[in-house]
Structure formats: structure tokens, C-alpha cells
Image (cartoon, rainbow, N blue to C red):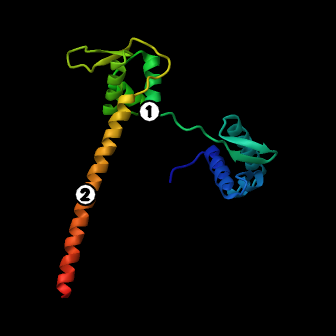
Amino acid sequence: MAHKSFSKRVLVAVTDRAASAPEGQATVSDISDAMMIQTTADHKRMLNTLSDLKNAGRIVRVSQGVYAPAKRESQPEIREVMWRVLRMRRRVTVDDLVEMAGAGAEYASDWLRMLEVRAVVRKINPGGGKPCVWQMINDTVEMPVDTDSAAKHRALRIKKKQQALADLAAAQKLIGKAHQAITELED
């Protein structure tokens, strides 16, 4: 089992105790009990750690001696991260977006082609087997909306629905044949 830092143990204790409490809060006493703190020195260390976690925005102090986990903002969408990387670097490759934004290579490539169609980026082929570089030529500040992607996904959903309905009809036909065979066996 990996060793957890004292700070991590305090954060886990706050989160666990708050999750089991009806108000979603944990008292210093609850946290101390959860961590099985026995000495004054450890208790003081826990209080200092609670203060550090509060200052870091990981927990909030509801009242004196009462803490709750902080509400964390969700992570931005991958295309938003790719947009930020593109605006910051001005020149990117698909591999850059894969590494820095956590996007898939195909998704990043499609996204860059969409921006090329909208005259936001220009594709530069360096040759010599090197990957293509995409250079920003028009910074629109706001990320362009990918309407083509929405249409592509809509068409894909329609195709999947049609295939599912065809599979269902085939299954119903086979069930009908099986039902007929069973009734013929009974006769």
C-alpha cells in the first residue's frame, strides 16, 4: 500500500466524515477521531494542515472547528484545452495537442481541419517526414463552434439506431422461429 502524506490523510478524513454527516460537514473532533490522533503535537499538526488545506482551496471552514470539502470546478472539455494550447503556442502539431490536452490523435486532427476550413489556422507541411504544423492565422478569441462535428455525430447516431432496429427485427424473427419450433415439439 502506498504511503499517504499527512495532508492527504487529513483531506480524506474531512471528505469521508463530511460524506457520512447529514450536513456534509466534519468537526475537528470527527477528523481527529478518523485519523486516530492521540498526541497534542499530532492534533496541532492536524489543525495546521486544515488551515493549509483551507488556504489552498481544498476545504472550506463552515464555522469554528467545522470544515467541509470545497466544491471543485469540473475540468474543461478537451476541445477547450486544445483551443487554449493553440492560442498560447500559435503553432502546434497533432502530437502537441495529444500530449498537452489529452486528446486523441484523430480527434485533434479533425478539430484542426475544422479550424482550417474556418480560416483560423493554416496547415504547414515541413516535408522530410516531419509532422504537419498548424499555425494560427486568425485569433478569434472565442473558440469557433464545430457544427460539422454535431452533424457528423447526429448522422452516426441515426446509423446506429437503424442498425439496432434491424438487429432487433432479426432477433424477433429468430425468437418467432424458436417459439414455432417449441410449439411444434409440444404437438
> Disc number at residue 167?
2
> Disc number at residue 146?
none
For the residues carrying marks 1 and 2, which lies nearer the camera in this image?
Answer: 2
Q: Residue placed farthest to the top in the image?
A: 137
Instruction: Tell me the residue at 73%/56% (across/down).
Output: 30
Instruction: Tell me the residue at 50%/54% (across/down).
Output: 1
Quadrant showing the C terminus: bottom left
Say what amino acid the circle numbered 1 marks.
Ile
Vertical placement of 74 versus 35: above or below?
A: above
Quadrant assignment, res 52:
top right
Quadrant assignment, res 168:
bottom left
| Horizontal relation, residue 68 to residue 187: left or right | right
Q: Is residue 35 visible?
A: no
The residue singled out by tag 1 in the image is 78
Instruction: Tell me the residue at 66%/52% (across/down).
Output: 13
SS for tag 2?
helix
Vertical placement of 11 versus 106: above or below?
A: below
Indicate which disc, 1 or 2, sits on the residue closer to the N terminus.
Answer: 1
Say what amino acid the circle numbered 2 marks.
Asp
Of residues 107 and 182, the one drawn nearer to the viewer in this rendering: 182
| Horizontal relation, residue 68 to residue 186: left or right | right
Q: Position of residue 98 (x, y in %)?
A: 37, 30
Q: Position of residue 10 (x, y in %)?
A: 66, 48
SS for tag 1?
helix
